[in-house]
Image: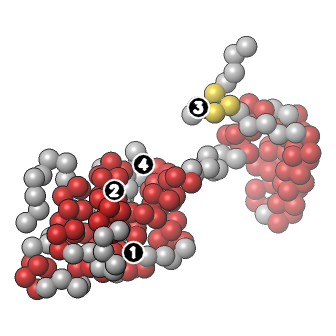
Amino acid sequence: MWKYVIEGSEKMDLDIKDRLFLYNQYEILKGLNTERIKEYELKQSILTNGFKYDYDDELIGGFYDETPELVSEFVYDVLQMYRELDDSLSELSEEENQHIDKHDITYAGFDGNEEGSYYTYANFVLKDLGRYEEIYNNGKAKLNSHTNMVNKYRRMVRTWKEVKSEECYNLSFENIKKIINDKYLFKETVK
């Protein structure tokens, strides 16, 4: 039997109770927003007739698949790592500070096209939840990197987790350099 598939998942299933609830929601919306009555009546027609083919596009077109918890955990790791890099920089000596390029310890975002779930979740954490304000509000955050960052961040986070277990609070100059070096696959060392 042939099944229609969109982006790797089958069409949404709605039982009669789901369809009735949604139908009633659109009935309420018709009373609240009279300019969109035709749109809501179309959706009610889809529900009444059980046109499953049109469920996804017409009823939940703005909904995305769930973001895996691993993506969310990774985003938090990346943001926390950048917080600690930034905090640690302020504890370095003036001479050490001169050998760290501020760009290298500034959060660069995720690619909005290629890393959509990471990009969307990071923006949610920074903008909507208002967390990691020092990364976002101080104008340091470039939210869309326009280049793939996940693999770079994986290397950096792996090293950050290794060295952070060695240190109580701030990262040392040497460990900051280790983390930064993992950002660049082909660079031997960072100044």
| Residue located beneath label 2 in the image | 158
At 17% across and 74% down in the image, what residue appears?
Answer: 173
Quote the CA–CA distance across marks 4 and 2. 19 Å
At 40% across and 70% down in the image, what residue appears?
Answer: 80
Q: Quadrant of the N terminus?
A: top right
Quote the CA–CA distance across marks 2 and 3. 30 Å
Quote the CA–CA distance across marks 1 and 2. 23 Å
Up-down relation of residue 14 to residue 83 (above or below): above
- Amino acid type of the residue that numbered disc 1 sits on in the rendered structure: Tyr
Residue 103 or residue 28, whichever sits in front: 103
| Residue located beneath label 3 in the image | 8
Left or right, residue 74 beside residue 46: left
Quote the CA–CA distance across marks 4 and 1. 19 Å
Question: Residue reaching furthest front?
Answer: 166
Up-down relation of residue 95 to residue 185 (above or below): below
* Picture quadrant of residue 89: bottom left
Q: Position of residue 178 (x, y in %)?
A: 20, 62
- The first of marks 1 and 2 along the sequence is 1
Question: Pointers 2 and 3 in contact (CB under 8 A)?
Answer: no
- Amino acid type of the residue that numbered disc 3 sits on in the rendered structure: Gly
| Residue located beneath label 1 in the image | 136
Residue 161 or residue 23, whichever sits in front: 161
- Amino acid type of the residue that numbered disc 2 sits on in the rendered structure: Arg
The reply to whether residue 139 is in sight is no
- The first of marks 2 and 3 along the sequence is 3
Q: Secondary structure at mark 4?
A: loop
Question: Pointers 4 and 2 in contact (CB under 8 A)?
Answer: no
Disc 3 residue crowd, few under 14, some 14–19, many 20+, Cα 10 Å: few
Specify the label residue 115 is tagged with: 4
Residue 33 or residue 153, whichever sits in front: 153
Q: Secondary structure at mark 2?
A: helix
- The first of marks 4 and 3 along the sequence is 3
